[in-house]
Amino acid sequence: MSNGDNPNESGIGQRRVMARGNKNAIYEDRRAEIITAAASLFRSKGYRGTSIAHIAKVVGTDRASIYYYFSSKEELFDVLVTDVVKNNLKTAERIRASDAPAPEKLRTLLVGLMESYAEHYPFLFVYLQENMAHVDPQRQTWAKEMRRVNRRYEKAITDIIRDGQKDASFRTTGEPWVLAYGVMGMISWTHRWFNPHTSEVNATSIGETYADVILSGLTT
Amino acid sequence: MSNGDNPNESGIGQRRVMARGNKNAIYEDRRAEIITAAASLFRSKGYRGTSIAHIAKVVGTDRASIYYYFSSKEELFDVLVTDVVKNNLKTAERIRASDAPAPEKLRTLLVGLMESYAEHYPFLFVYLQENMAHVDPQRQTWAKEMRRVNRRYEKAITDIIRDGQKDASFRTTGEPWVLAYGVMGMISWTHRWFNPHTSEVNATSIGETYADVILSGLTT
DNA sequence: GCTATTGTCAACACATATGTTGAAGAGTGG
DNA sequence: CCACTCTTCAACATATGTGTTGACAATAGC
């Protein structure tokens, strides 16, 4: 509270915490700038391979300044990734809940997912390439939540496939969950080779190609 | 050279280097033991997330003892991974060179790859989860070689698909290389969820399921 | 039992990363 | 031009990891 003339206490830490509660526009801009730089580095070097010093350098500032905007590397990563991932889940669950035929659902989901990857590039790819099985023990709460999101995502796809098998619009050529992982793999693996800014094929056509291959195998 | 009575020189470094040229059976056993422990850790924590100290602890020895057997963490990783990866490439290229029809080739390759994953578990998965785009700048020679292996692998699959399109056993539903990446993604992504020791479905049936889905979409 | 070789230990040097903070600079409104 | 706030700088404390080496233990051969 009253820390008026304590010579040992400049109150900077406090001010920093306050700043983080800021709604200031310039402040938010700077945050966004840092996030973008971080995302690009996380993507090219991975989370562990990226140091805050390096992020600062790319932004053109000092390491301490990063800490003015984010309390830790974790927070940076989480902010960068969480929103867009959760958003994708919502889309998937909405598609599952729709009353389109199963093949239609699957196609919509695949194409939409690819388009989301491209639109939010590289945020989702950063998330994909960080294996949730490898996170530090300290981040368990966040990791747990993300794993839950993942499971729900997997479940949405699995459900769609199972429903399709039940109403005979899909062949029963394998366990729904094995097929779901296969489909996700096809899409997820794009993070290893696809860059929407440089690729000669666009996200939509990739999604449609894959949907095509899968569906013409799954449909009767 | 003649370091006979230099009190500052016990020659241990030399002996270590020599030991590494050893063909001794016990020595090789110990090496293998370390490799196995390391593989398991790399798999669960990733390369960067695994420290040599931790490997030593699992083996039940001291960190320095690891250095007696391997000159660095890199060497450990490389030894662990290189052989089996190259072997896989050879298999793929042999399949491409065979005179089976394209769909047959693709099926054989997919099933074989899955079986190789299971047989050499977790070595190939360790390799898969380490994104070659993220390796340290110091390991460039090795990384370069591995990328070359990867490219050849991709090329083998792409070739098979393109040939199939040419002789009309495959629909031309997309660029061969996009399809190749899709196929590889389906298989590669298994490293995120498949453990041959605990899974209720076996590698062969996964491979066959995926081959089935893909082929019935690609074949006319 | 003694000696030589093989393997292990404990400590060091070095490098890199995170997170903190006192003080100083830059810019803005009065 | 002064005061105030936001932002940055330079330095520190701390932690973790790699790679090295002198000394020591264990084991096998003589």
Image (cartoon, coloured by chain):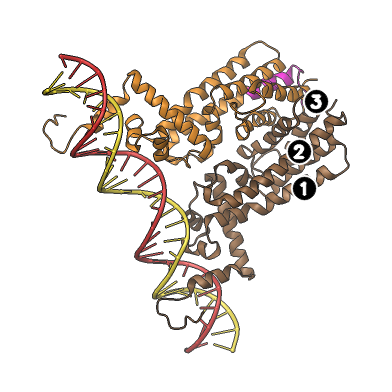
Chain colours: A brown, B orange, C yellow, D red
Q: Is residue B26 left or right of residue C2?
A: right
Instruction: Identify the subunit bearing mark 2.
Output: A
Amino acid on which disc 1 is placed: Thr
Residue B11 shows in this picture: yes
- Identify the mark at residue A172; answer none if there is no mark: 3
Cα separation between marks 1 and 2: 12 Å
Q: Mark 1 against mark 2, which lies toward the viewer?
A: 2
Q: Position of residue B7 (x, y in %)?
A: 13, 37
Secondary structure under badge 1?
helix
Q: Position of residue A101 (x, y in %)?
A: 87, 37
Question: Closest to the observer: A119 or A165?
Answer: A165
Judge the density around disc 3: few (<14), some (14-19), many (≥20) Cα neighbours within 10 Å: some
User: Which residue carries the number 1 mark?
Assistant: A91
Amino acid on which disc 3 is placed: Thr
Mark 1 near mark 2, Cβ–Cβ under 8 Å?
Answer: no
> Which segment is the magenta one?
B157-172
Question: Closest to the observer: B27 or A36?
Answer: B27
Amino acid on which disc 2 is placed: Ile
Instruction: Identify the subunit bearing mark 1.
Output: A
Secondary structure under badge 2?
helix
Q: Is residue A98 left or right of residue D1?
A: right
Secondary structure under badge 3?
loop
Cα separation between marks 2 and 3: 15 Å
Asked if residue A74 is positioned above or below residue A158 in the image, the reply reads below
User: Which residue carries the number 2 mark?
Assistant: A157
Q: Residue furthest top?
A: B99
Q: Position of residue B195 (x, y in %)?
A: 60, 29
Q: Are marks 2 and 3 on the same chain?
A: yes
Q: Is residue B56 a member of the stretch shown in magenta?
A: no
